[in-house]
Image (tube, helix red, strand yellow):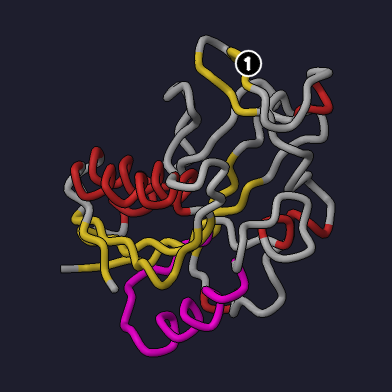
């Protein structure tokens, strides 16, 4: 069974010192590097949040405060600080991540009108990123997922992986949660288990 590792959004803005830092994010990078070094993956795919500066998920573009919610194109949208803006250091992969191991990179959130938590598609399920096509072209059957953040982009990437027919695993030691609310990370694990995702570690 061919397998791929999907490394979700390990970017400067989501790590310590970034504009949308996930608590203890840097702790997962050695674990991810070790997975890439010691395991035989047929493909290693990095996803990259890659927003235009006028992205509608940014509180600053809606005259809202960070943490508020709006309805954006018929779906609820949490208001985030500006992050992972194209051409900025914050959008770059963290320098400690062994990016030379990647065989493919998928950029998401490039449409200013709609957010994209999942590495497979936008939040409206209108536009695909090409990740599913890439994995199916390479006959991948099993995906293992790590990265940031557990309760948003990792969760939705894993749920879409199951929906697209992949045997799906999330490495608990390779992810951290934003925890906008204290139990969000724990709740995400329960949701994933209910969807048929295996949580490793």
Please report the residue visible at 57 percent of the width from the left and 42 percent of the height from the top: 180
The chief SS type of the magenta part is helix
Q: Is residue 149 left or right of residue 90?
A: left
Q: Secondary structure at mark 1?
A: strand
Please report the residue visible at 74 percent of the width from the left and 54 percent of the height from the top: 91
Residue underneath mark 1? 70
Between 146 and 140, the one nearer to me in the picture: 146
Whole-percent x, y for residue 42 in the image: 32, 72
Whole-percent x, y for residue 80 in the image: 70, 35
Please, is residue 104 above or below residue 197 in the view?
below
Q: Is residue 172 left or right of residue 105?
A: left
Task: Tell me which corner region of the image, top left, top right, bottom left or bottom right, holds residue 111.
Answer: top right
Q: Quadrant of the C terminus?
A: bottom left
Please, is residue 19 above or below residue 109 in the view?
below
Please, is residue 97 above or below residue 12 in the view?
below
Q: Is residue 181 left or right of residue 65?
A: left
Task: Tell me which corner region of the image, top left, top right, bottom left or bottom right, holds residue 200.
Answer: bottom left
Whole-percent x, y for residue 66 in the image: 74, 32
Q: Which residues are magenta?
A: 25-46
Please report the residue visible at 77 percent of the width from the left and 35 percent of the height from the top: 52
Q: Quadrant of the N terminus?
A: bottom left
In the displayed orientation, state which residue is furthest to the bottom: 38
């Amino acid at each position: 069974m061919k397998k791929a590792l999907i490394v979700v959004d390990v970017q400067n803005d989501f790590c310590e010192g970034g504009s949308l830092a996930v608590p203890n994010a840097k702790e997962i990078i050695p674990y991810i590097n070790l997975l890439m070094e010691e395991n035989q993956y047929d493909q290693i795919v990095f996803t990259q949040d890659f927003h235009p500066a006028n992205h509608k998920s940014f509180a600053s573009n809606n005259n809202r405060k960070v943490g508020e919610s709006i309805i954006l194109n018929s779906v609820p949208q949490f208001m985030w600080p500006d992050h992972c803006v194209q051409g900025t250091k914050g959008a770059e992969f963290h320098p400690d991540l062994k990016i030379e191991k990647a065989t493919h990179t998928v950029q998401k959130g490039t449409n200013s009108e709609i957010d994209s938590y999942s590495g497979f598609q936008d939040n409206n399920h209108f536009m695909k990123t090409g990740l599913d096509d890439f994995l199916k072209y390479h006959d991948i059957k099993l995906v293992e997922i790590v990265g940031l953040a557990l309760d948003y982009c990792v969760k939705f990437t894993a749920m879409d992986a199951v929906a697209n027919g992949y045997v799906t695993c999330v490495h608990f030691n390779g992810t951290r949660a934003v925890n906008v609310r204290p139990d969000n990370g724990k709740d995400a694990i329960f949701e994933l288990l209910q969807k048929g995702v295996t949580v490793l570690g």
